[in-house]
Image (spheres, rainbow, N blue to C red):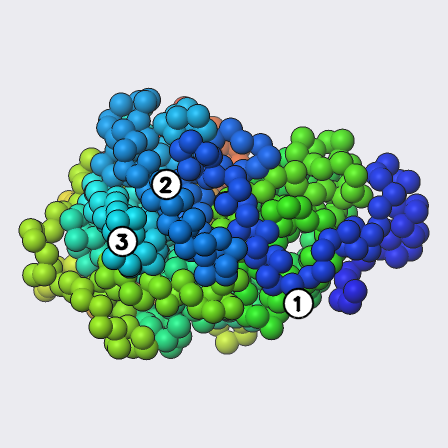
Amino acid sequence: MKDINWTPLLCCLGLTLFVALTGQAQTSQQQIGAENPPFSLDEVQKRHFLFFWDLAHKSNYQVPDRYPMDNFSSIAATGFGLSAYLVGAERGWITRAQCAERVLNTLQFLKNLPQGPEASGVAGYKGWFYHFLNTADARRFKTVELSSIDTGLLMAGVLSCMTYFDRNNPTERAIRETADFLYRRVDFNWFMNEHHRLSMGWFQELDGFLAAEWSGYNEAMILNIMALGSPTHPVPGGLWQRWCDTYYRANFKGQDHVNFGPLFGHQYSHCWIDFRGIQDDYCRRAGFDYFENSRRAVLAQRQYGIENPGKFAGYGPDIWGLTAGDGPDAEMTHQGRKIFCPGYSARGVAIDYLDDDGTIAPTAAIASLPFAPEVCLPALEAMWKRWPVGPYGFFDGYNETFTDLSRSPNAQAGYPFWVDRDYLGIDQGPIVLMIENYRSGFLWDLMKRNPYIVNGLKRAGFKGGWIDKSVVKSATDEDDFPGPMQGPNPNIPLDPDGFFTRGIIQDKTGHSLPYRLAVPTHETGKKFPLVIFLHGSGERGTFNKEQMTNGVHAFCEKDFRKKHPHYLLVPQCPPGDRWGPASADWPDLFHENPTTTGQLLLDLIDKTMRENPDIDPSRVYITGLSMGGFGTIDMLMRRPDLFAAAMPVCGGGDVRYAERVKNVPMWVFHGALDETVPPRCSKAFVNALQSVGSQVKYTELSTLAHGIWYSVYYNPNVLEWLFAQKK
């Protein structure tokens, strides 16, 4: 073996002492790998295919979520299984007739399953299916959600079978008709919210939808394409633009790409759609396609594995890959700290994401094989020779750092480190399909002939490459559909984060400032206010999400946004820095030169106004809490001419410079019981303002301490005052 990073314990003390210390079986990694069959792509792919062929339930043909534990089936795994059967037929592992029989039985069973709004005894509603189904009767498992993405993955498998079985015989005609029925039955419009995005799920018990929505970039690309391509319940074409609005493009580990942490988000849609050489509007602006985006994400993950900042055992050039899957479900001590390694978890890394506990899922690298074979194929071979495999290929996860197997409820015995006991269908499927796409492009070529997929891609604005050469007849605009497009479902609650796009601004020295920006619904000829919201010290970070914790969403309330449409800019201060020097030493210090983050913030405000000419320069407001309260005053002192009003909350400022901002309308808030930032900080600055003639307003909440954000920002009178100000 080559390129294996042995742990320092193994290197220094030897395997015998390692085994003695861990109390595990006397089995070396060389011995583990030697027990596997000789490596070949055919052997790997066939074993993972057999998971679906052997384990689909004999009476209802649904694929178990996992094995050997088998508590319920997974509709997404069934979708992967339907396409995997086609691969088996193409590879000669089963006959076309065997494949057709299994597919038809599966599709007819799905068609005949009861659908309805009841809490139990049904498998779905309005064409959608519940995430998990009971093993015995394929009805809803417990109280799981009606799942949009899992139904989408099921339908991708359904459509692949509809296209593959194109012969004129009773079985194959029945497959096409049943597959077409299942897809046409899905009411995509019912799941679309007022953001023009699809909700993630619906619960009968809640009599409603999840506010969580599918916004890019992630595994739901294929779901959106099928929603756009539906001939019976098509969503408006604007859905794709609203999906793209929330992409987060950034450079991570030397790769400029639209980020998403777990690799399955870069793989699932590509199992069926060949994105090579076709581009939507976003890709045309970016200069690369989604296939290239996934390739860059894979290379970034491999680089992370090489750097191995967590110092986990085994990581290296050929042992890497983080995605959703199983883990030890127990705590371990590593590098002097305790780490809880979850059971099932969406592990991954990106500019805005870090979930890594030493658990590698083989599907992460293997299902990325078409994107970067030069690094994924060596990884596949190294893993095959290094880790134990079973009759259905790789187990779902491996963690060489986790060695106290007695603590893990799902570990296999007999190995010196954690090896999962289970296989997972949604991780097995991409291995089968993506190996095949690497070997032959079979599924990609197949779906190029599916009119619904082609239609969805064209309505999303994809052009170039194979799609321009497609002769598949498809509807491409709203005039081609039998009836008017339905609007969004007003009964779906909105995710307040769904109003925001994400970005990063960077200076010439490489310092960066992440931010989120909410944009109003544009009306020609109108101007809109801009609000800058500065968070407190506890929300500093680099993931571009923590700053949304306190107070921000008050500006996103439906009635308020309707009455006061506005831009809302919410930057995130990096760890170790502050919005302004004044906040470092309470109210006693102001520097003429801003902090690094302060300068980036000023640049960001200018950039936002420059790029959005419908921002009203006479209505630019700034507010902030705690550290952001200090930052609010610091920004005012630097650009008093810019702001129409300010609301510092639990902050303060340098009293010596009150003269600079005396003409800016200001409402200052503080909690009387605040021990984190004493009220005297606000009072001193308010007194200084009043002494120079300012009409500043001051409110001290007598019964509250530091956390007064809700009381301030959710008070409609406060926001009404702010939006009434104008230079």
Q: Quadrant of the C terminus?
A: bottom left
Mark 1 lies on residue: 378
Of residues 124 and 611, the one nearer the viewer is: 124
Give SS at disc 1.
helix
Q: Distance between the residues labelled 3 and 2?
A: 18 Å
Crowding near the residue tagged with mark 3, few <14, some 14–19, many ≥20 C-alpha atoms within 10 Å: few
Identify the residue at image location x=33%, y=36%.
Answer: 109
Mark 3 lies on residue: 169
Is 137 drawn above or below residue 416 in the view shown?
above
Residue 403: image location, x then y, percent: 77, 41
Question: Hey, which quadrant is residue 274 in on the image?
Answer: bottom left
Instruction: Confirm whether residue 600 shows in the render.
Output: no
Amino acid at pointer 3: Asn
Q: How far apart are marks 1 and 2 (CA)?
A: 36 Å
Q: How far apart are marks 1 and 3 (CA)?
A: 44 Å
Identify the residue at image location x=40%, y=62%.
Answer: 443
Reading the chain from its start, which is encountered first: label 1 or label 3?
3
Amino acid at pointer 2: Thr
